[in-house]
Amino acid sequence: MRNKEVEQKIKNAVEHLTPDVLDCILSECDERRGNVYIVQPMKRKGRWMYAACALAAAFVLVFGGLSAFGWISAHQVDALVTLDVNPSVELKVNKDDRVLAADAKNEDAVKILDNMDLKNTPIDVAINALIGSMLKHGYIQENSNSVLLSVESVNGAKSAVLQRNLTESISRQLNRVNGAVISQNLTNDGELQTLAEAHQISYGKAALVQKILNENSHLLFADLAKLSINELNLLIGSKHIEAKGMEAQGSASDTAFIGEERAKQTALEHAGISESEIERLRIELDYDDGAMVYDVEFYHNAQEYEYEINAKNGTVVEHDRENRDRDDRREPPAAPQSHNKDDFIGEARAAEIAEKHSGVPRHTGMKVELDKEDGFYIYEVEFDADGKEYEYEINAATGEILSWECEEM
């Protein structure tokens, strides 16, 4: 295909260089009709003349071919560079690292481009201009300071160099907001491209979301696709996610959230326990039921406490408490538990224990069932109160609360 294009260009050039004198010659013939001219045979030229003509023709072919090849090469896409914050801008780059085209991938990106003509601009200059525009329009600021840089090229070595150089350039520009940069080296994936188009996000953001999902199977692509790059960066840091071809510089800002310290204090206050009394504390930022949450877990007096705290407003979304040695407690004791229901505390007493523990005397749909698990009997108590769903497991013989859960309805 390329050879045909070169041949056509040479043909066009020759046609423009050769004057069209046919009409002029015919006109002269008409005026001088009837006259006879004797044409003397031309003297025979030496072989050197033919050689010179052949050489000239070869020169034209080679020079024209090289020129055409250079033109095509300069206008051919060699790499794709994408910037994501919330605005997503994709830059098509040639082999000389100059921009061929800049495409806005969403409405916010149209504002960022702001009628800028980036064509034929060096890629580093174009990136600096885009980062400056994002800062100007408030898409990058102290409480949302993360930028995603994605580089895709068939030339792996070039892709790595672009990734490194552009990351350093972006980091310098983000110094004033203590910015964070996630950069990644990508290859083409048709299935991932389809997902990106379906959720109306860039291919680079789709690749980042997939990296998080690879380490957290309980999350959904559709949910994470809605998050900002800064929120995704916070999840990556909290879950210590590492992936081939992905690098991170700086720290994502969490100033839009309550922070781990407040999340911990909220959980401890709800449980009525001081920090000095707990062990094995773990706090992790997560995403659940449409919101960013802090998962807070700790142990106290052989019981495990689990909390979900809304990351933005600090409310308790869900909490659970369970005996750490619960499985041991369910093993049949040395003196087997009586199978006579008359020896059990009874459903009314089990309901009373659960009600008292919850602290919500007004409830609906109280359900109490006797069940046998792991060799002994328990009462399962369930009810709803104040927009929350409570579940208890109570030892049928002793009245001990084996586990309890409270979830938002």
Image: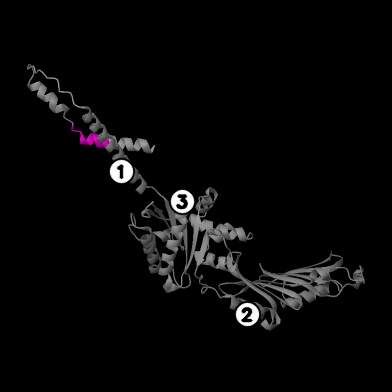
Q: Which quarter shows the C terminus?
A: bottom right
Residue position for label 2:
265
Q: Which mark is residue 44?
A: none
Q: Earlier in the sequence, mark 2 or mark 3?
A: 3
Separation (CA) of disc 1 from disc 3: 24 Å
Which corner quadrant of the image does residue 104 belong to? bottom left
* Nearer the observer, 317 or 174: 174
SS at badge 1: helix
- Give residue 115's position: percent from left, percent from top: 33, 59
Residue at 54 percent across and 73 percent down: it is 257
Say what amino acid the circle numbered 3 marks.
Answer: Asn
Residue 67: which numbered mark, if any?
A: 1
Badge 1 crowding class, 10 Å Cα cut-off, few under 14, some 14 to 19, many 20 or more, is some
Verify whether residue 16 appears in magenta. yes
Identify which amino acid the numbered label 1 is placed on.
Answer: Ser
Q: Which residues are magenta?
A: 12-19
Alpha-carbon distance for marks 2 and 3?
51 Å
Residue 83 vertical position relative to residue 68 in the rendered view, above or below: below
Of labels 1 and 3, earlier in sequence is 1
